[in-house]
Image (spheres, rainbow, N blue to C red):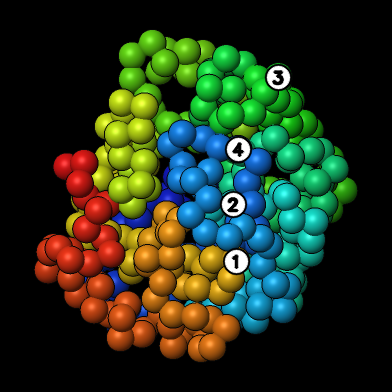
Amino acid sequence: METITTRIDRVTGLTREYRRPDPPAPRSLKIEISARCDFKCFFCATGFKLRKKADIDRGLYERVVREARQAGVEELGVFYLGESFLCEWLPEAVAYAKRDCGFPYVFLTTNGRTATPDRVRACMEAGLDSLKFSFNWANEVQFESVTGVAGRAYHDVVKHVKAAHAVRGDVEARTGHRCGLYASSIEYDGEQLVQMREAVAGIRPFVDEHYWLPLYGQAGLTAGARGTKPTPGNQGRVGALRPPLPCWSLFTEAHVTYDGKLAACCFDHDGRFDMGDLREKSFAEAWHSAKFQALREAHLRQDVAQTACERCLVCE
């Protein structure tokens, strides 16, 4: 089984064939099954409530996913900015992508709180290929401080990571399908990093791979939150950081919000990166829209002044 970091590095690696205003279909698509989230993490602008939060219309989901696969997209993330396990029909969404549309790789990232064994089992049985836990807290106190949720839920997350490992083994034994299990953590500094490493050691035996991420500024919305200094843009993962310009995200990965907008950014919390309404046009049309091509041209020139991306680089 290919590691998750290998896949991430392939998506974030902006090769020559994609360095153009009208690139081929993206390697990956993340679609927002639910914009709702049960956390209010200080490093994520989801809790700012800058837009309405709801679940995607099922018919819209199925059409966009089908069109993306027909366009040549190979990897589908059934999540974007919200917590997908809050959507009741998440397993059906996975099954549709795998069995009806033929996606080779369907993946999901979760904060873990609602990733109960029964819900995880249903997704794995539906064909989920990768489940990653965003694990960004070292103990109860830090969990509550970061997420705004009662600290006791920290133990639920740890329990769910461990349970997912057991569920994976059972599903594989019965069906032959093996879902990759992963975890990522923000690479804080100082004492926080020391504590995080200890906490990660506790879950490491239950995942196939763990990796570290830089602290993102989320399109400039969380830059400087709680005195932190995030990296500009989305530079990928620690160990394989990419230049902030041109941003790979505009060229190799598509992002669709629950209300059908094709976003140019990994962190479109306020709608400013809307490149096309997929309720009115096809996925391919929006991917190659004049607006999207103009923004990509600015990135290729490495001059995003007076574009939607300008604020994302203020922390340089």
For the image, the number of numbered tags is 4
Image position, residue 303 (x, y; %): 12, 64
Cα separation, mark 3 vs mark 2, equals: 22 Å
Three-letter code, disc 2? Gly
Q: Between 206 and 216, which is closer to the camera in this rendering?
A: 216
Decide: few, some or many residues near mark 2? Use Cα within 10 Å; few <14, some 14-19, many ≥20: many
Cα separation, mark 2 vs mark 4, equals: 9 Å
Task: Provide the residue designation for mark 3.
Answer: 152
Image position, residue 77 (x, y; %): 57, 59
SS at circle 1: loop
Q: Is residue 179 above or below residue 160?
A: below
| Chain-order first, disc 2 or disc 4 | 4
Left or right of residue 303, residue 71 in this image: right
Asked whether the beta carbons under mark 1 and mark 3 sit within 8 Å of each other, the answer is no
Task: Provide the residue designation for mark 2.
Answer: 82
Point out the image quarter for the C terminus: top left
The disc placed on residue 39 is 4
Q: Is residue 130 visible?
A: no
SS at circle 2: loop
Image position, residue 164 (x, y; %): 74, 36
What residue is at 38 percent from the left and 11 percent from the top?
191
Left or right of residue 197, residue 222 in this image: left
Asked whether the beta carbons under mark 2 and mark 1 sit within 8 Å of each other, the answer is yes
Residue 66, quarter of picture: bottom right
Task: Provide the residue designation for mark 1.
Answer: 258
Cα separation, mark 2 vs mark 1, equals: 9 Å
